[in-house]
Image (cartoon, rainbow, N blue to C red):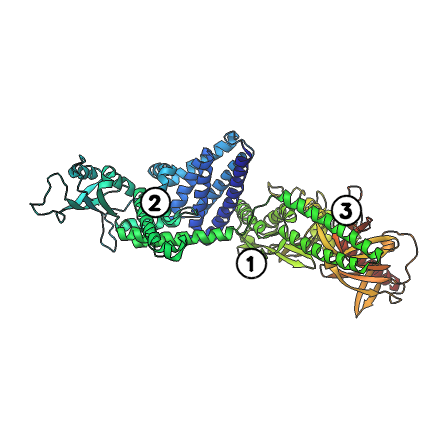
Amino acid sequence: MSKTMDHAQQTFVEESRDLLAHMEESLLRLESEPGDAETLAAMFRAAHTIKGSAGLFGFDAIVSFTHVAESVLDRVREGKLCLDGGLVALLLSCCDHIMRQLDSVEQGRLGVTAEDDEARGAELVKALSALLGEPAYASSAAASHPTEESNATPSREDGAAGASGREYWHLSLRFGADSLRNGMDPASFLRYLGTLGTIRALVTLFDAMPSSADMDPESCYLGFEIELESDAKRAVILSVFDFVRDDCNIRLLPPRSRIDDYIKLINELPEDNLRLGEILVASGALSRAELEEGLSQQDAARSGQAADTGSQRGGPEAANDGVPQIGSILVDKGAIDPPVVNAALAKQDRVKTKRQEESRFVRVQADKLDQLINLVGELVIASAGANLLAQRAGDGALQESTQQVIGLVEEIRNGTLQLRMVQIGDTFNRFRRVVRDVSQELGKDIELIINGGDAELDKSVVERIADPLTHLIRNAVDHGIESAAARVQAGKPARGTVSLNAYHDSGSIVIEVADDGQGLDRDRILRKAQERGIVSPNQHLTDSEVFNLVFLPGFSTAEKVSNLSGRGVGMDVVRRNVEALRGTVNIESQRGRGTKMIIRLPLTLAIIDGFLVGVAAASYVVPLDMMVECIELGDRAGTHNYLNLRGEVLPFLRLREVFELEGGAGQRESVVVVQYAGQKAGLVVDALMGEFQTVIKPLGKLFEKLRGIGGSTILGSGEVALILDVPALIGEAARKEKSSAEVAQAAVA
């Protein structure tokens, strides 16, 4: 297979997955908010697009399965099927099956699926067919062929008459004068026309008949006005007169009910960039021959206009002024009704607007963005090195030039990082399905509320946080939310609530998973920890410390093990995955009120703004977003590990002691005040060295568990500076303050 075809198939898979995600989201929305016709139409178009695209590549398995699902959606859209919970579950299973088929396409094994997949697909088709009924399924299967589908016209309901009073097809025939000479018998065409339906009325016109003296017995002067009752398509009716099309004038007007059907079909056509005539032909409102005649008439008018005005105005563009539009030509010829043309023009405008929106976006492979980020990181390091050399050289002009380069590099860095920033809302929306499926399995009524879906963070962070969030949400549904009976007994609404919330705070993104369930049982957790020897009986722990015990490997207070949870496996993995992203996870809970899991993550894992500080001979970087201010330490601290900051007690850490650096304190120590998750602390350093664009380099496995260190970076001099793990250091300062307070309290006692 060629690289072009490989790329096209990959694009098909990616776009189809996006369409399936939108279908799933729409189904879940319709389950709670039924009756949204626009959402139903969008789902139908998505299924139709997947089927049509799969047909281009010859993926018959996807085409045949999607066609049955599309037929069911069509019935729902027409109001012939009710979209209840059972049908939503069935269609969601269909989405899952199509997703597995797409996975097979991506892996190059479509048609070599496992037996259980085939059996599952067959069961789904059987369930869908039962909803359709055999006759309906047969007719919908016939529509799966592209040739027929492009000219498909819904059947007219018997006896339907429109506002115009046209109940039947109206055919105006004017045979040409040479028809008889060419061996064509008008009566034979009328007899053949009768085989397509019933001729309800036929009027013979003699208006072209000359006087007897001028009459030519070999010439045809007849015309006919015919009312035809038929379910045949427009193209089929016009094909009756294919042999005399060049020798006669034909106008075919549809029944009024057909006009409404044409407009409906036009609105349901795929969002392709079609010309007006192609839209009309695709909907069946116009035949290809009628379109060709109209285009020929337009070309003739354009040629005549060019001959008259081209020499005067001097440009071919001027020749298009005054040339009738194809829609006007077709309406004037009586080939089509104005409402149908207007619907096609509206469709064309919608497609054009959508294409303009889509043209604003470019699909880029993630590894190319990663490579660009890496190159920008190297550019940041190189520009810092050039600036350092310029400072050492003492050349003012050179320093000014390097500063300008650094400013441009910073803009490039910010723009490049923005390319990888995505909204977390798409990830949040996936969990609607998780909550729905798990709550139904447990027999609970639970609603998922999403806030802050427009908050942005690095794509790599989004991808790696999905699994921890899934586990937290399943835990909230399984352990957090009570049964409906228990909730009512406790004075709560029968429907439980799980909420997902995201917002930015101090250069981080905060993700909260909360429920209004029974909350964590502090005493039970503590008792379980004491039974396992994790906590001694006389040890005093805060609520936060007790709740954090659930993150220990294998720790569980569940009374029974289910297929969802209860084995004590998962929460430790959640914390490990979050910490691998340089984040933290904490728990807030009130008995009987609910539980909130709070995850804090950095916005990006690549490049940050930092503040460079020096301690002894070592250099450290403090993330700039977590810095509040810098103050001089002086003698205000005394022998304590805290100081008075404008009436606020500020615990601090001496980095020299934390990292066990040799040498005495500097002559002028400073305190860098940092803040994280609402807590403040001070970091005592020897030197303040200014802001620094920091390219984050991961620590090796040997050093990844270092306390207080979150990564490393390379300075312009080529030396390595360590990036401080501010959350860990703030926690350490808080523990030291608590320990000092306990010691002081014990001394007083």
> What amino acid type should be assigned to the residue bearing mark 1?
Lys
Marks counted in the figure total 3
Residue at 90% over, 59% down? 666
Q: Can you tell which quarter of the image residue 454 is in?
A: bottom right
Residues marked 1 and 3 touching at CB (< 8 Å): no
Residue 87 position, x and y percent, is: 44, 44
Which-is-in-front pick, marks 3 and 2?
A: 2
- 653 shown above or below 464: below
- Which numbered disc, 3 or 2, marks the residue that appears first in the sequence? 2
Q: Can you tell which quarter of the image residue 398 is in?
A: bottom right
Residues marked 3 and 2 touching at CB (< 8 Å): no
* Mark-to-mark CA distance, 3 and 2: 76 Å
Number of residues whose C-alpha sits closer than 10 Å to that of mark 1, classed few (under 14), some (14–19) or many (20 or more): some
- 357 shown above or below 69: below
> What amino acid type should be assigned to the residue bearing mark 2?
Val
* Mark-to-mark CA distance, 1 and 3: 35 Å
Residue 448 position, x and y percent, is: 55, 53
Residue 179 position, x and y percent, is: 18, 39
Q: Going by the image, does 202 lie left or right of 160?
A: left
> What amino acid type should be assigned to the residue bearing mark 3?
Ile
